[in-house]
Image (cartoon, grey):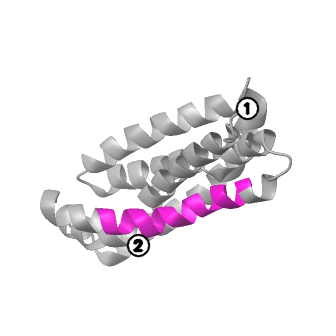
């Protein structure tokens, strides 16, 4: 039987990097959405900036919580919970029409969801698949979140004028 030259662990790295790219791209591409959201919801720039700043704070708070939940319940639980939170908070944010709903949906819920579906959850998975090339695999994973901003920002900028 011939052994495949492709190591399956690289599939895990690619999938984890793509998911990290999407979740961090969603969270960190707020600059493109800033003025359309402020105009649509009637928020001042300072109010919307405050929501975003508090969201970043909650994102930082959510990261150790994700790590704790992962050690207690496992990676699968945290990733599924994070995905559910992202979907629910994105729908909730899109349908928000007042300060408190947008603050709770975008500022808090989406911050938790994207922190749960981030490098905190994927690092142990990738590390378990690699011994020899672990540094490279973790490097590729970490570039997924930074690439999220570089990739998703122009994508959102393209679609906002089309769909609003």
Residue 148 in view here: yes
Query: Residue 58 in the image: x percent, y percent?
Result: 57, 56
Which of the two labelled residues, at mark 2 and mark 1, occupies the earlier sequence position? 1
Q: Which residues are the magenta region? A: 137-155
Q: Residue at x 32, y 43 (%)?
A: 92
As helix, strand or loop, the secondary structure at mark 2 comes to helix
Query: Residue 139 in the image: x percent, y percent?
Result: 70, 61
For disc 2, the neighbor class at 10 Å (few under 14, some 14 to 19, many from 20) is: some
Q: Which residue is identified by label 1?
A: 3
As helix, strand or loop, the secondary structure at mark 1 comes to loop
Q: CA distance from mark 2 to mark 1?
A: 54 Å
Q: Is residue 84 left or right of residue 91?
A: right
Q: Residue at x 21, y 63 (%)?
A: 160
Query: Residue 25 in the image: x percent, y percent?
Result: 45, 59
Q: Is 160 covered by the magenta stretch?
A: no
Q: Is 152 covered by the magenta stretch?
A: yes
Q: Residue at x 24, y 46 (%)?
A: 95
Query: Residue 164 in the image: x percent, y percent?
Result: 16, 60
Q: Residue at x 85, y 46 (%)?
A: 131
For disc 1, the neighbor class at 10 Å (few under 14, some 14 to 19, many from 20) is: few
């Amino acid at each position: 039987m011939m052994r495949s030259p492709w190591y399956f662990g690289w599939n895990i790295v690619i999938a984890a990097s793509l998911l990290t790219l999407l979740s961090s791209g969603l969270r960190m591409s707020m600059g493109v959405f800033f003025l359309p959201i402020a105009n649509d919801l009637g928020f001042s720039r300072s109010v919307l900036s405050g929501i975003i700043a508090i969201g970043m704070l909650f994102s930082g708070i959510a990261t150790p919580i994700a790590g704790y939940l992962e050690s207690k319940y496992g990676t699968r639980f945290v990733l599924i919970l994070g995905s559910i939170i992202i979907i629910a908070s994105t729908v909730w944010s899109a349908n928000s029409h007042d300060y408190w709903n947008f603050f709770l949906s975008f500022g808090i819920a989406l911050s938790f969801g994207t922190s749960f579906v981030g490098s905190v959850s994927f690092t142990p998975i990738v590390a378990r698949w690699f011994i020899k090339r672990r540094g490279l695999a973790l490097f590729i994973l970490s570039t997924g979140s930074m690439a999220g901003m570089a990739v998703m920002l122009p994508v959102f900028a393209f679609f906002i004028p089309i769909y609003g």
